[in-house]
Structure formats: structure tokens, C-alpha cells
């Protein structure tokens, strides 16, 4: 069996499961946010449930339209807050104590290797970075999981992606995943688990691994996963009292895969996904004369500490271009505070960038940086669909924090090398 | 579970905006949504459907947004089964969760015409085209999902199990 099959088998009381099989599995953590939880809450209220069996396994995060952007979003958040109080859900993260869900849950120790996590949000697949099975579902699934502690799942086929060689300067995990999606297309991994392997993956930090697994859904994947190793175990050591059971699984040598793809990363330069699909990727050197009205560094893909450090390295002592509004969004309060202590915020503000509180905000065209007609933006987010960040006639390009920071300085899409000296390379 | 009905045929990549256009998302009432089912492609579709009819479609049926209103609209207008070459993943889940039976088969799409009468045994995966006198075998509908569908969707299945448990 491969790692995904092993985790799923361990959650439905079976010795073995095979791709294609339907199972009813135990959920370790069920996640909802200010957009998707309200619908699930209505379902639960319809049934007049008096209590929930495992409120400690539920995590609710108000992150999409917070700080509340209008009356409607305020009411949605209030609904979630009242529900949490009524049903004793202690893990409700409101403005001020949380941040973007997919950065927050690993940071708070909710994700342990071998766990099964479902979330009513498509980027729930991020948590595979810690060797967990994690997938996005609908609101009814969330309601059912909150009530019963279970989820029905079809055991997915797996695809293996192996990365060999040595990374070029300024190439990060964001570039690897963009390159991969460019290679297989937005439905290249439809329904499947994407298993990432190889010596390059083994050297990635947990932050970098989260970025890779985060975008599995952009290739149609049901989940992304990286088998746990020393880096994973060192990361979870910070949680003195782990919130879940740790299960260390790895794929057998003879495990079955629908497909195996191998990449020589030495051939990959920093990547940019052109409008309007994440699979529309090119090397940054091919992105000539694309002037930018805005740069956004943040989101559940690239708003973690490692990302902010890279951006600061490039922006230190520089100014962002006069035509390019630059918004930096630390993904959680803890990341914000640490960045402050390390002096990163000072670098950003001196460079003329604005620092936003943790929020999804512009990533879904919600608030805090929405685009006008014909404007172009390079963002470290994960989707560049038509109108994703604002006006239907605006354009979003996706790239890494290094490319984003360099582009902010140049006012057009730029290679980090054009701005930072080689000494400063990653 | 045996389903018998007349076929309404569609092509590839039918998206959720075509199944139920966004302006109608202001309600979650199945019957109301049903009146506008498939309006994005065929404005008179809901009027043509008789209770128990079957939709046969090509690849990637239900792509687009994750709105649960789409399978609700299909159910609400009287469709009893959707057979498609493939389904978009979240749409597939949503169908089961609201209690709409679905089967995956590309062969049926190739070999069926609009107006044909099909008789389908969900449990065995047997499809008979009565009009053309042909039979097909597809992967049977998994027993777990059968149970959920039979109960009328995931939440109803949950309530049912709850009642059974409390009687034990
Ligand atoms: S940052 Fe963007 S992609 Fe991530 S959870 Fe928020 S809206 Fe979704």
C-alpha cells in the first residue's frame, strides 16, 4: 500500500484498502471557516442536535472576510461564534487570535502525521505536508463530520512526483509546484492523491512543504502528501502536548501508483503562472515587460515566516516601484509577531509596502487589495482565475515571494537576480 | 434499487452555472430550484422532464463551483439518476450528500439517444436500453453510497442511524 492507503485503512478499522474503494472513515480534525461553516451550522440546527460528540476535534476559523468587511460578513462570523459557544467548540479562532486557517492549524499543533483531516475549504490539502491525509469537502460533509465524527471517502489512486538534483538560485517550493501544475495541467491529478518525493523534497522546510501540498488542488488533486521524516518530527516536537495521535506511515516499495513523474530541478528557473490558470506557467525570464499595478505577498500558500524572510531579504534597503502598490500579509498573528521581532516589518514599511493584518482578503477579491479594471497584479497566492482578485478585466500572475518582492521593486515581473546580489541568494 | 426513465442527453463539461444559474441561488428549496434546472443550456428543460427521467452526459459533469444547489435542482425537477462519463469531484460528493444517484460510464453516453428508455439496477450496475434492446454493465453503485442515497442524503442517513442506535 502507499502512504495514503495506509492512513485511510487505519481510520476505518481495516488492514487494507485499495484505490476505488468507498469507506466511512474517522475524522481527526474537521475545519470550517466564515464562509463554509454557516451552511453546515444550518444543517445541524435543522436537526436540533443538543450537543456534538467531539467538539475538541472541530476547528472554526474566521479568516476570509475578516476584519469583517461588511454587514453580511459580520453576520456570518457572528453565526459561527454563537455556534461555537452553544456547542462548546473551544477551537474558534476569531480576529486577534488566529489568522489564515491553513497556516494556523499546523502552527497550533492540530495537524499530526498520520491524521485524517477534512475541511470545508479546497486548500485543506495543505496539511499533507506533515504526512497527514487532508482533503477539501462541502458544507454538508462538514456538518456530518461535526455530528458523527466521520466522513465517507473514495480511496483515491495516487500519483508520485519525484524531484531530483540541485535547486537553482532563487528557486523555491512554489516554483516546483507551479512547474508541476504547468506540466500536468489543472486536471492532471483529478481525484488523485499527489505524493511528493525525492532528495529535493527531503531538504524542504515544513513551510516549503506546506506551499507544495497547498496547490495540489490546483492540479485537481484530492490531496497532496509528503511522508514524514526528521524535519516533520522536529517540527511537531514544539507541541509539548500534541492535540492528536501521531502515526508514522510510509509507502511500501511495491506500492501502486497511477503514474510516476520525475523531474530534474536543475532545469527549473523561478516560475510565473500567467492569467487565467495556475497551469499557464512559464519561466520568469519569459515574462518580459509586464508592468504591475500591485504585488501581494501572503495567503495560505506563501504567507509564512520563511516567505516573509525571503521577501525582506530582497526588499531590504530598497523601495518598491512608485506604480506598484505592495501589500504584505503575514498569515497568522504569531507569524506577524515573529516578523516584527526579526525586524522584517521595518524593512517592508521602509520599502514603501503596506502590512495588512492576517486575512485571506485580496486572495479571493474580498477586501484589503481588490483590483480595478485592466490592473495587473503578481501575487504569491494560488489561483489566478478570471476576476479572482477583483474586476473581471484585471489580471493575476502567480509567483514565489522572491519573484514578488523583486517585481515590486522593478514595477514589472522580474527575476530576483535583477534586484538582489548573488550573496543574498537563498 | 431499480430506476427506469427517459433519457435527456447532454455533452461534456456541463458546469454548475449551466445546471443552475447563479441568480437562483437565493433559495435552497429543491422544488423552486428544480424549475430552473439546466436553464443555462435549455430554458425549457424543466418542463420536458417527467418524474423519474435520467440525464446522460459526457465528461466532467458538474464542474465549476461547489454549490450544492446544482444536484438539488436536478433532483427537484424530477430527475432520478445521472449517468456521465466522469464527474467533477466536489459535485460527485454533493450528489451523494443530497441523495441524487449517479453512475460513471462513458460507454452509455456513446450508445444512447435522447428519448431512449433506460432501466438501471444500481446495485448490480446493469443498464438496459429498452428502446434499443441493448445491455451494458458498469461498476455497481458502492453499497455505502447506496445506503446514503436510499435514506435521501447524508443528513437523513445520519438521522436514521441515530434512531437505530438509540433503539438498540
Ligand atoms: S488565503 Fe486564499 S486560498 Fe487560502 S484559504 Fe484564504 S481565500 Fe482560500
Image (cartoon, rainbow, N blue to C red):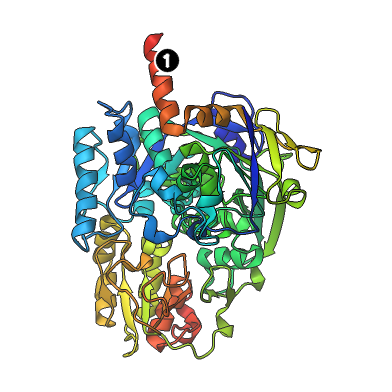
Q: Is residue A252 left or right of residue A91?
A: right
Element assignment for label 1: helix
Give the image location of residue B15, x and y in percent.
Answer: 54, 58
Residue A99 falls left or right of residue A301: left
In which quadrant of the rendered view does residue A393 lie? bottom left
Q: Looking at the image, which is closer to me, B8 or B57?
A: B8
Is any part of residue B58 visible from this angle?
yes
Evaluate whether residue A222 shows in this view. Answer: no
Crowd rating for badge 1 (residues with CA inside 10 Å; few <14, some 14–19, many 20+): few
Q: In the rendered view, does B42 fall on the left or right side of A17?
A: left
Please name the residue shown 64% across and 35% down the image: B4
> In the rendered view of the protein, which quadrant contains the N terminus of chain A?
top right
Tell me the chain of label 1: B
Residue A355 is situated, as x and y percent measured from the top left of the image, at 26, 71
Comparing A80 with A327, the one in front is: A80
Residue found farthest to the top:
B168
Judging by the rendered image, the residue that carries numbered circle 1 is B164
User: Residue B113's spot in the image, x, y percent?
Assistant: 72, 51
- Identified at 66% across, 51% down, the residue is A160
Q: Which quadrant of the structure image shows residue B50?
A: top right
**Which residue corresponds to the image point at 66% horizontal and 72% vertical from the top-left?**
A267
Above-or-below relation of A299 to A169: above
Please tell me which residue lies in front, A329 or B45: B45
Q: Is residue B83 left or right of residue A349?
A: right
Q: Quadrant of residue A277?
A: bottom right
Residue B126, placed above or below residue B165: below
Number of numbered discs? 1
User: Which residue is depicted at the point 37% across and 37% down?
Assistant: A143
Image x and y of residue A239, in percent: 34, 41
Above-or-below relation of A242 to B59: above
Amino acid at each position: 500500500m502507499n502512504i495514503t492507503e495506509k492512513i485511510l485503512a487505519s481510520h476505518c478499522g481495516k488492514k487494507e484498502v485499495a484505490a476505488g474503494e468507498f469507506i466511512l472513515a474517522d475524522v481527526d480534525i474537521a475545519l470550517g471557516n466564515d464562509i463554509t461553516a454557516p451552511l453546515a451550522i444550518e444543517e445541524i440546527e435543522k436537526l436540533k442536535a443538543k450537543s456534538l460528540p467531539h467538539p475538541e476535534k472541530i476547528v472554526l476559523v474566521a479568516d476570509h472576510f475578516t476584519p469583517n468587511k461588511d454587514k453580511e460578513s459580520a453576520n456570518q462570523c457572528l453565526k459561527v461564534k454563537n455556534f461555537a459557544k452553544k456547542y462548546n467548540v473551544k477551537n474558534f479562532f476569531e480576529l486577534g487570535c488566529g489568522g489564515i486557517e491553513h497556516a494556523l492549524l499546523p502552527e497550533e499543533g492540530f495537524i499530526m502525521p498520520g491524521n485524517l483531516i477534512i475541511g470545508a475549504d479546497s486548500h485543506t490539502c495543505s496539511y499533507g505536508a506533515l504526512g497527514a491525509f487532508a482533503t477539501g469537502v462541502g458544507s454538508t460533509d462538514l456538518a456530518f463530520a461535526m455530528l458523527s465524527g466521520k466522513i465517507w471517502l473514495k480511496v483515491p489512486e495516487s500519483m508520485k512526483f519525484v524531484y531530483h538534483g540541485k535547486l537553482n538560485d532563487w528557486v523555491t517550493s512554489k516554483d516546483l509546484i507551479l512547474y508541476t501544475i504547468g506540466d500536468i495541467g489543472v486536471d492532471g491529478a483529478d481525484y488523485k492523491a499527489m505524493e511528493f518525493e525525492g532528495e529535493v523534497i527531503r531538504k524542504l522546510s515544513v513551510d516549503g512543504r506546506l506551499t507544495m501540498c497547498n496547490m495540489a488542488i490546483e492540479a485537481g488533486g484530492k490531496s497532496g502528501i509528503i511522508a514524514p521524516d526528521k524535519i516533520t518530527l522536529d517540527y511537531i516536537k514544539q507541541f509539548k502536548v500534541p492535540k492528536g495521535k501521531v502515526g508514522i506511515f510510509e509507502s511500501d516499495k511495491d506500492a501502486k501508483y497511477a503514474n510516476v513523474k520525475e523531474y530534474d530541478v536543475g532545469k527549473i528557473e523561478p516560475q510565473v503562472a500567467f492569467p487565467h490558470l495556475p497551469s499557464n506557467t512559464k519561466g520568469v525570464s519569459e515574462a518580459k515587460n509586464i508592468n504591475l499595478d500591485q504585488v501581494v505577498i501572503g495567503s495560505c500558500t506563501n504567507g509564512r515566516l520563511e516567505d516573509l524572510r525571503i521577501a525582506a531579504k530582497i526588499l531590504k534597503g530598497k523601495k518598491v516601484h512608485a506604480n506598484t502598490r505592495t501589500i504584505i500579509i503575514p498569515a497568522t498573528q504569531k507569524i506577524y509577531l515573529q516578523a516584527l521581532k526579526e525586524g522584517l516589518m521595518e524593512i517592508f514599511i521602509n520599502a514603501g509596502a503596506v502590512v495588512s493584518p492576517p486575512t485571506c482578503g485580496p486572495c479571493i477579491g474580498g477586501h484589503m487589495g481588490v483590483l480595478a479594471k485592466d490592473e495587473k497584479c503578481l501575487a504569491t497566492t494560488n489561483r489566478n482565475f478570471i476576476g479572482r482578485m477583483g474586476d473581471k478585466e484585471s489580471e493575476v500572475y502567480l509567483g514565489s515571494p522572491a519573484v514578488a518582492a523583486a517585481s515590486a521593486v522593478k514595477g514589472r515581473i522580474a527575476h530576483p537576480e535583477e534586484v538582489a546580489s548573488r550573496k543574498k541568494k537563498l | 434499487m431499480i430506476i427506469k426513465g427517459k433519457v435527456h442527453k447532454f455533452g461534456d463539461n456541463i458546469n454548475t452555472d449551466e445546471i443552475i444559474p447563479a441568480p437562483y441561488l437565493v433559495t435552497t428549496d429543491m422544488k423552486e430550484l428544480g424549475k430552473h434546472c439546466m436553464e443555462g443550456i435549455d430554458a425549457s428543460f424543466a418542463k420536458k422532464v417527467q418524474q423519474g427521467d435520467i440525464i446522460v452526459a459526457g465528461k466532467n459533469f458538474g464542474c465549476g463551483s461547489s454549490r450544492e444547489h446544482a444536484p438539488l435542482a436536478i433532483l427537484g425537477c424530477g430527475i432520478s439518476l445521472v449517468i456521465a462519463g466522469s464527474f467533477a469531484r466536489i459535485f460527485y460528493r454533493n450528489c451523494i450528500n443530497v441523495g441524487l444517484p449517479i453512475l460513471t460510464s462513458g460507454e452509455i453516453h456513446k450508445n444512447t439517444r435522447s428519448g431512449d428508455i433506460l432501466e438501471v439496477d444500481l446495485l448490480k450496475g446493469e443498464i438496459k436500453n429498452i428502446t434499443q434492446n441493448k445491455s451494458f454493465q458498469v461498476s455497481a453503485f458502492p453499497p455505502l453510497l447506496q445506503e446514503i442515497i436510499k435514506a435521501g442524503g447524508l443528513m437523513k442517513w445520519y438521522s436514521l442511524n441515530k434512531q437505530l442506535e438509540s433503539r438498540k
